[in-house]
Image (cartoon, rainbow, N blue to C red):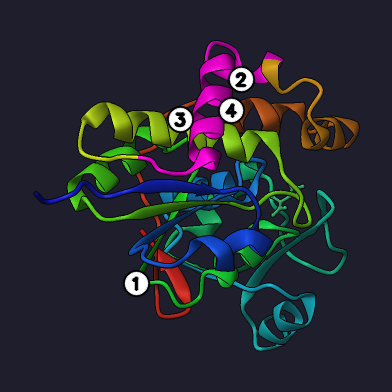
Amino acid sequence: MISKPRVEVCFTPNLFPLHIEDFQVVVVIDVLRATSAICTAFHHGVKKIIPVSKLEEAIEYKEKGYIVAAERKGKIVPGFDYGNSPFTYMNQNLKNKTLVLTTTNGTRAINTAKNVESLIIGSIINLNAVCNHLIELKKNVLLLCSGWQNKFCLEDTICAGAITDQLLKSGDFLIENDSSIASKYLFLSAKDNYFGYLKASSHRKRLKKLNLNQDIKYCLTPNQTNVVPRREKNYLIS
Ligand code: 3SL
């Protein structure tokens, strides 16, 4: 009997080495806001995104003349062109351009999964597109939540639960791991009102303090785009 592919959730990047064995596809999720911003950028015509983990690398790219976006703790790093707000990327000036991006957690998570066969970018705003893509691929999928500084975070886990739920409903996938079961149940309790459910969550509060409620609402609104950004070499394309 041929067994079905698995879908599994990894709650934080530092747990990644414990999960990675046997997965052909990794989906990196950072709902607030890195992967939502990346999807938005491609939806609005950005050509390539080079994700870098460290500010030093971002500075080197800037010195070489690249357009560079840098965020730390929710704010644009002084001296850089852009930050991590998805609205920044609804910008005609960035059409067909290559962008370098560094964020507190999201780009680190992407680079944590350096050696996997296939890496794609997931968020709530491209939820169905990601699920359809994975259902077509029918390979073992690891959903890597970016978390916050290697700590568990609710919004990424809910998104991972939403993907898990759709893959299970397709009948083509199975889950074997408690993190996947927990994510699915969190999603089921949150699905009717993500914004309300996440009211007390740490990153929603952090962004609210920075007057970024509009960003939060945007990032929690499902299926605004069909892009499924993927990694090729050291950059992302769609
Ligand atoms: O951690 C990250 O990568 C960012 O998405 C954090 S923030 O939403 O820009 O604050």
**Residue 218, image quadrant:** top right
Circle 2: element type: helix
**Residue 199, image quadrant:** top right
Instruction: Please report whichever mark, 4 or 2, sits nearer to the chain's N-terminal start.
Output: 2
Mark 2: give few (<14), some (14-19) or many (20+) Cα within 10 Å: some
Amino acid carrying label 1: it is Glu
Q: Which residue is mark 2?
A: 194
Circle 4: element type: loop
Please identify the dominant SS of the magenta region.
helix
Q: Which residue is mark 4?
A: 220
Instruction: Please report whichever mark, 1 or 3, sits nearer to the chain's N-terminal start.
Output: 1
For the residues labelled 4 and 2, say whether their Cβ atoms are less than 8 Å apart.
yes
Mark 1: give few (<14), some (14-19) or many (20+) Cα within 10 Å: few
Q: CA distance from mark 4 to mark 2?
A: 6 Å
Left or right: residue 153 versus residue 123 is right
The x, y position of residue 89, in whole percent, is 57, 49
Q: Which residue is mark 1?
A: 117
